[in-house]
Amino acid sequence: MERVGILFVISGFSGAGKGTILKEVLSQMPDLKFSVSATSRSPRVDEIDGVHYHFISNDMFEKYIESEAFVEYAKTFNYYYGTLKSEIENPIREGRDVIFDINVVGAKSIKEQYPDCITVFVTPPSLSDLRIRLMGRNSETEETLDCRIKEAKKEIIEMQNYDYIIVNDDVKKCANALISIIKSAKYQTKRNIDVIKSLSEEQK
């Protein structure tokens, strides 16, 4: 039986450090495919189109919505974010594991459509620590800062629906925890039914 790729969905509060953790994980697991989300917002100074996001216009995003090109999409802080079907379906058919960085709304949609996916929520030790991290970006106004903290408080309710929770108090430690989750998922019984079937056939 050909191996089907596993989907890993990573969520967390804006400013929780997901991007930094994923950068470390991907440097250690080059075969893991990072699913590049699409967004209608403009790139930040250090962001590259096609690497961090597919940056597209608001009008183009809505055309993609009409053509049902997205597995999931949502509007957050007045910008669209979404996952293109091609970012999932092509790699998993080839047996590649795919990892996502998406919000709780998108994660819920992915879980409904791909119930075998593994979900992980990344959180800072506290909301006060989150505020400090957001301020450190030097890209937030007082208004957007308050908005992101309010959004984080709403997302706390969704944390219980995730398979794993990682507290980001040390990037390397958190990256290693995520790598352990990814590696162990390959050995779950439900992903190795063919082994059981093969052994059962030998007994006949």
Image (cartoon, rainbow, N blue to C red):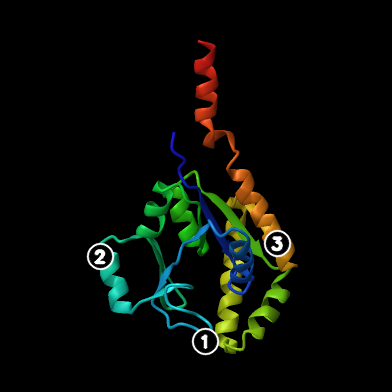
Please tell me how crowded label 1 is: few (under 14), some (14-19), or many (20+) other residues with Cα within 10 Å.
few
The residue indicated by pointer 1 is 45
Q: Quadrant of residue 126?
A: bottom right
Q: Position of residue 165 (x, y in %)?
A: 66, 56
Query: Going by the image, does 148 lie left or right of 74?
Result: right
- The residue at 49%/73% (across/down) is 52
- The residue at 45%/47% (across/down) is 95
- The residue at 33%/79% (across/down) is 57
Mark pair 3, 2: CA separation: 38 Å
- Which of the two discs, 3 and 1, labels the residue nearer the N terminus? 1
Is mark 3 in CB contact (under 8 Å) with mark 2? no
- The residue at 46%/62% (across/down) is 35
The residue indicated by pointer 2 is 66
Q: Position of residue 193 (x, y in %)?
A: 52, 30
Residue furthest to the top in view is 204
Is mark 3 in CB contact (under 8 Å) with mark 1? no
Which residue is nearer to you in this view: 113 or 170?
170
**SS for callout 1:** loop
Q: Quadrant of residue 154?
A: bottom right
Image vertical order of residue 92 relative to residue 146, above or below: above
The residue indicated by pointer 3 is 174
Query: Going by the image, does 187 lie left or right of 167?
Result: left
Please tell me how crowded label 2 is: few (under 14), some (14-19), or many (20+) other residues with Cα within 10 Å.
few
Amino acid found under the numbered disc labelled 1: Val
